[in-house]
Image (cartoon, rainbow, N blue to C red):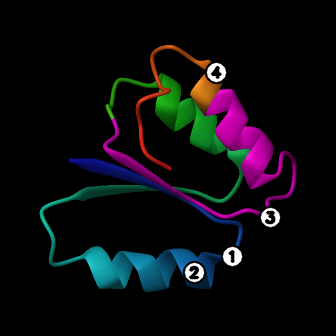
Amino acid sequence: HNILIVDDEPLNIKLISVFLEDQPYQLFTATESIAAWEHLKGPNKFSLILLDRMLPEIDGLAFAKQVKADPLLRDIPI
């Protein structure tokens, strides 16, 4: 399973990564919504998106709406 962690605070990403490191997940990270979108449109399929609500370019709620509007991504839990 692949998990995408999206947070503009590197410390938050590190804390979540440490918490999940012993689990059978492949973790991908992004500090901005544009990079997160590139991950989602890439070859990897994601089982979960852990998303910060406050991001620099596009806030987390707007990003979540974009994900849910995409027929190929809408079933990924956020």
* Element carrying mark 4: helix
Going from the N terminus, do you reach mark 4 or mark 3 first?
A: 3
Q: Measure the alpha-carbon separation of dots 3 and 2.
A: 13 Å
Disc 3 marks which amino acid? Met
Distance, label 3 to label 1, CA atoms, is 10 Å
Secondary structure, mark 1, is loop
The location of residue 47, given as percent across then percent down, is 31, 43
The residue indicated by pointer 1 is 9
Question: Which-is-in-front pick, marks 3 and 1?
Answer: 3
**4 vs 3, front mark:** 4
Task: Please give the residue where the numbered disc 3 appears in the rendered image.
Answer: 54
Kindly indicate whether the residue at mark 2 contacts the one at mark 4 (C-beta within 8 angstroms): no
Residue 34 shows in the view: no
Most foreground residue, 30 or 60: 60
Q: CA distance from mark 4 to mark 2?
A: 27 Å
- Circle 4 is placed at which residue position? 69
Q: Are marks 1 and 2 in contact (CB under 8 Å)?
A: yes
| Rendered view: 19 above or below 34 | below
Q: Observer-nearest residue: 30 or 75?
A: 75
Image location of residue 1, percent across then percent down: 20, 47
Badge 4 or badge 2: first in the primary sequence = 2
Give me the C-alpha separation between circle 1 and circle 4.
26 Å
Tell me which amino acid carries mark 4: Ala
Quarter residue 36 falls in: top right
Q: Residue at x 35, y 23 (%)?
A: 43
Tell me which label, 1 or 4, sits earlier in the chain: 1
Answer whether labels 3 and 2 touch (C-beta < 8 Å): no
Instruction: Please give left or right for residue 35 compared with residue 21 in the image.
Output: right
